[in-house]
């Protein structure tokens, strides 16, 4: 199966509604693409205007790239110390991998609170190199298990290339 690196950067959010009754907003983002989810660090400083500037690397099947159609969900949560984290809002997106650059979209709530729109989320994405994913026939077709292995292999290859580069210079 062919796939591609897909780089997604969560920059910041502006003008979020404060969902806390007590305490201050400490917001983080959960980004889900191609069956994988990754999290930013919690912004402890900027309250309703968090900044992360966190870049993630996902592996997206080539068939999604060819269709120019990658589904993404970005959920925002407020970190709480003594109870479950509180839902702030989300974006449900269909990204066009052929496009790149920064985007700003309105954040929406997906619950009964009734807030139609509030605040914006700034992000960017870009398409990376093509890779080949080899599966043996006895393994399941779960793409996320393969991705974990690819990340390890990718890290090893990167270190190997750096060593070779140092040896040749």
Image (spheres, rainbow, N blue to C red):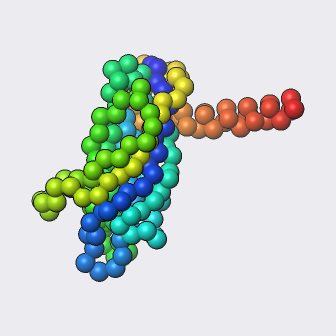
Question: Can you name the residue that lies furthest to the bottom here?
Answer: 22
Image quarter of residue 63:
top left
Give x and y (percent) for residue 35.
36, 37
Q: Residue at x 33, y 39 (%)?
A: 72
Mark yes or no: residue 76 visible.
yes
Give x and y (percent) for residue 38.
43, 48
Question: Against 43, is 123 above or below?
Answer: above
Q: Residue at x 28, y 74 (%)?
A: 20
Query: Image quadrant for the N terminus?
Result: top left
Mark yes or no: residue 135 visible.
no
Is residue 28 rendered to the left or right of residue 91? Answer: right
Question: Against 127, is 19 above or below?
Answer: below
Query: Image quadrant for the C terminus?
Result: top right
Image quarter of residue 77:
bottom left
Viewer-proximal residue among 167 and 114? 114
Q: Residue at x 51, y 46 (%)?
A: 55
């Amino acid at each position: 199966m062919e796939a591609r690196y897909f780089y997604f950067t969560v920059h910041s959010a502006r003008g979020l509604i404060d969902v806390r009754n007590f305490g201050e907003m400490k917001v983080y983002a959960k980004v889900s693409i191609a069956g994988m989810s990754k999290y930013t660090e919690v912004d402890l400083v900027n309250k309703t205007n968090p900044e992360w500037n966190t870049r993630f690397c996902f592996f997206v099947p080539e068939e999604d790239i060819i269709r120019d159609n990658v589904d993404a969900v970005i959920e925002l949560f407020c970190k709480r110390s003594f109870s479950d984290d509180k839902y702030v809002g989300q974006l449900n997106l269909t990204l066009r991998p052929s496009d790149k650059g920064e985007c700003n979209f309105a954040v929406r709530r997906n619950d009964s609170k009734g807030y139609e729109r509030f605040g914006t989320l700034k992000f960017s994405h870009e398409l990376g190199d093509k890779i080949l994913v080899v599966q043996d026939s006895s393994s399941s077709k779960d793409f996320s298990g393969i991705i974990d292995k690819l990340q390890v292999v990718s890290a090893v290859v990167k270190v190997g290339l750096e060593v070779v580069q140092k040896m040749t210079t």
